Image (cartoon, grey):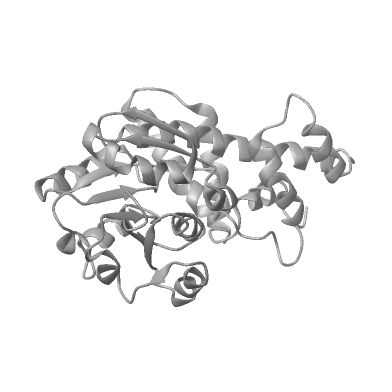
Amino acid sequence: MSSTTTIAVLGLGAMGLPMATRLAERFTVRGYDINPERSALGADAGVSPAESARMAATGADAVLLAVRNRTQLDDALYGADGVAAVLSPGALVILTSTVGIDAVREVADRLATEGLHFVDAPISGGPVRAGQGDLLITVGASDEAYAAAEPVLSHLASTLERMGPQPGDGQAMKTVNQLLCGVHIAAGAEALALASALGLDPAQALRTLGAGAAASFMLGDRGPRMLQAYDDEGAEVRSRLDIFVKDMGIVSRAAQGAGLATPVAAASEQLYLIGQAHGLAAADDSSVITVVAPKDH
């Protein structure tokens, strides 16, 4: 792949936009999002805006999907503006989202009958790292599909791990990753809530925890926003709470299918579900601390 390679990025949200911007440094990138404001932001960063998903994908060598869930994945590929119908045989479909193992395998099988290569490549790292090409990407793809997609994925990743030859293998690793991420956020919320309840200064407690064995990426990343969660305007939304409702549900179903008990993950999932029930679905996932210790507590 080279600068003449055309990549259509569908979904210019919190992760899609910085990935599209990063890819535009090396490739020809077209972007589409249902929100015109996101497309305009992409245009400012060198991403050519398209009026529809099909217009973005027509003639593209690869389509990178940054969607929220299985429903959006199906719609992007096979809905009224679905792109599968306009892709040429041999084109790549790269999925960077977390939608679950079974969902990916079903979609991959359907695309294969249409002569399209599917690359299961869920990402982890957050928007800032996406724009820097510093993501963890776990991949499940055939030899041919992986070889074709590797230049694109390498430009986005600092750690690129091919977990296996089948779509779904990347999702399996991402499921394990999300178990830890979801648990770490919930545990960080409990720890900072306890520090406050014991009369400690939460900011000092966070700084101290970050210097010792209790430190984690999620505590360091979400901790400052947990301290902002009690402000009137709340924390900046960088990762919606309902994303972890979805992801912990994927973890739970995968564990049940494997016959494995995951009691810590299950307890964490309940916190996110309670947060969603209390109107926090669109809030930053750091606001889960207010489930542990409500604002009026």
Identify the residue at horizontal 25%, vertical 55% (top origin). 61
Numbered marks: total: 0
Asked whether the viewer can see residue 177, the reply is yes
Q: Nearer the viewer, residue 71 or 216?
A: 216
Q: Where is residue 271 in the image (x, y as percent from the top left)?
A: 57, 44
Q: Which of 18 and 26 is in front in this view?
A: 26
Q: In this view, does 212 lie to the left or right of 140?
A: right
Q: Position of residue 41 (x, y in %)?
A: 51, 71
Identify the residue at horizontal 76%, vertical 42% (top origin). 193
Task: State whether residue 278 is above or below residue 137.
Answer: below
Q: Where is residue 225 in the image (x, y as percent from the top left)?
A: 71, 52
Identify the residue at horizontal 34%, vertical 22% (top origin). 259
Task: State whether residue 271 is above or below residue 38.
Answer: above
Q: Where is residue 109 in the image (x, y as percent from the top left)?
A: 16, 42
**Which quadrant of the figure has residue 237?**
bottom right
Task: State whether residue 127 is above or below residue 142.
Answer: below
Identify the residue at horizontal 40%, vertical 70% (top origin). 48
Asked whether the viewer can see residue 98, the reply is no
